[in-house]
Amino acid sequence: MAVIKTENLSYVYGEGTPFRKIAVDNVNIEIEEGEFVGVIGHTGSGKSTLIQHFNGLLRPTSGKVFVDGEELWKDKSKLRALRFKVGLVFQYPEYQLFEETVYKDIAFGPTNMGLSRDEIDRRVRETARMVGLSPSLLEKSPFDLSGGQKRRVAIAGVMAMEPKVLILDEPASGLDPKGREQILGLIRDYHKTTRNTILLISHSMEDVAKHSSKILVMNNAQVFCYDTPQRVFHRANELEQMGLAVPQITRVFNRLKARGISIDEDVYTVDFGRKLLLERLKKE
Amino acid sequence: MIKDITIGQFFPGKSPVHRMDPRVKIVLTMVFIIMLFVADKIWGLLIGIAFTVFAYAISRIPGKMILKCLKPIVPIIIFTAVLNLFFIRTGKKLFEAGFILITDDGVNTAVFMVVRIICLIVGTSLLTYTTSPIDLTDAIERLLSPLKLIKVPVHELAMMMTIALRFIPTLIEETDKIMSAQKARGADMETGSIVKRARALVPVLIPLFVSSFRRAEELALAMECRCYHGGEGRTRMKQLKVSCVDFVAVAVTVVFFAGIIVINHLV
């Protein structure tokens, strides 16, 4: 069953003013449970606006959003409960930390859910371990941590709510390569252990290609395509026309093809590319 | 949504009023206020109204803006009218019932005060409609510069105001973002008692404070990197200049003012 579904979803900023702008235009999409979806699209393509609809932070101008089979906004009193099913990590989430200790900050979401103390304690410790925060850090002030640590605390704060769908808006931006790998690695591990649905917005085609099972491409407020990485990166020309790139390794292989070296499959990860080349070399 | 709040009410345009030197505009606005209070005959007040209408006409500010600026002061207008109507007991009796006594003096004063307040608000709003906040602070700085002689830090005050104005939209955007983030974590800001709602603001206010301090530090550093050292010897990119429009505006105001004084003495 689709865990997130939209029907003719549209959102317009500043309706009725000269600044009217269509941010999301008639989007119909179904995201299956357990999927790891990479969301790409250039700045202003509407991807951030779209994901804010998935947990009811924005109310669609027209159209419907279904989470886990239930329609958001149909019954406003249920909205908060549905919101707990979809965890949203904003860009630069470390700026939302506010509690005295890391422990309390991670516990903020679960406390709002009205869970028992033992359950909250279990979740806090578990997610802290999952994002690689040592137990000694839990009693520290979040403002004393390093940038990468703060980011992980903020992500843990959302993970601790154990949402069915976890949405992350550029979780690795502004971090050094090591920090990036760490964050993306923990998201992948989280996906592996929980099998929950993940939506990952990223500007890095490499990251998206490496981790996702499906890719959602947004362009000009519309969904350009929603398909497997292989099929999406197959349309390299179209992607480049809309100002997006394909992974570097795909470009390398496309050049090889252009030079007359026949390679049947679309390559979008380095590992797969290496395997393919090695097999080919062995054959020759 | 919180983003819809407009701060300042500047209405960009190219009318003569917009082109006036903001200093002259401030001074003339003050003259206009004095004018309204000097007028104590009905004809004088009509001239005041005429002046306001005339100023709006040439500034090409849409009429609905007038209603918009009056909206917040409706309670004050009603309060003043009621107060004057019921508590002035001199003059001819018009109506009496129990302890209520309405006299023609009361009605006169009530109408007079209401018209005066409306003109006052509408007229002074024209200043903020036609002058950008930055121009306003600039003008205030220049007008207050004589106070430097008695060691009032005029430039610093103006700089503080400019920075505050500049960062209002940034802070609104930031508040919006943090509120969304906390809502996504299940913070409930819309229901519950006042105490509960006030407490629900803590998760928004603390990150907001933290980022404001961070921003302030960054800005201070950036300013120092560009050798900012206060107002002394600082030149401006945009020089305020009194031009032809300003002289005409002063002349028109003087004519209206003179008209009011003449009418006060004649009628």
Image (cartoon, grey):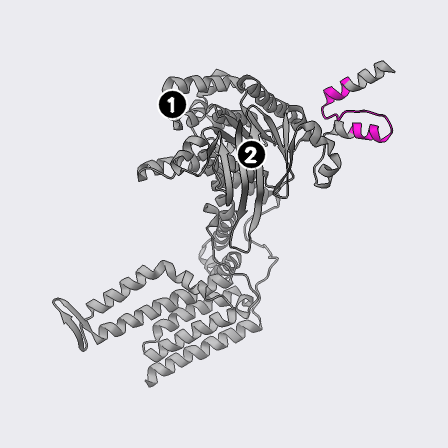
Label total for image: 2
Residue B100 versus residue A173 in the image, above or below: below
Q: Nearer the viewer, residue B97 or B163?
A: B97
Query: Picture coordinates of residue A191 (x, y %)?
Result: 56, 21
The furthest residue to the top: A282
Mark 2 on the same chain as mark 1: yes
User: Within the image, what quadrant is residue B201 found in?
Assistant: top left
The furthest residue to the left: B98
State yes or no: residue A265 in magenta: yes
Q: Which residue is mark 1?
A: A115
Query: Picture coordinates of residue A51 (x, y %)?
Result: 54, 36
Secondary structure beneath label 1: loop
Q: Residue at x 55, y 17 (%)?
A: A193
What's the magenta region? A252-275
Q: Amino acid at mark 1?
A: Leu
- The residue mark sitting in front, 2 or 1, is 1
First in sequence, mark 2 or 1: give its number: 2
State yes or no: residue A165 in magenta: no
Q: Nearer the viewer, residue A281 or B93?
A: A281
Q: Residue at x 61, y 46 (%)?
A: B227
How far apart are the two marked residues, 2 and 1, measured between alpha carbons? 27 Å
User: Within the image, what quadrant is residue A248 found in?
Assistant: top right
Q: Residues within 10 Å of mark 2 (few under 14, many from 20)?
A: some
Q: Amino acid at mark 2?
A: Gln
Q: Nearer the viewer, residue B256 or A78?
A: A78
Q: Which residue is mark 2?
A: A91
Residue B119 versus residue B133 in the image, above or below: below
Query: Picture coordinates of residue A273 (x, y %)?
Result: 76, 21
Residue at mark 1: chain? A
Please identify the quadrant where the C terminus of chain B is shown.
bottom left
Q: Residues within 10 Å of mark 1 (few under 14, many from 20)?
A: few
Residue B185 visible in the snapshot:
no
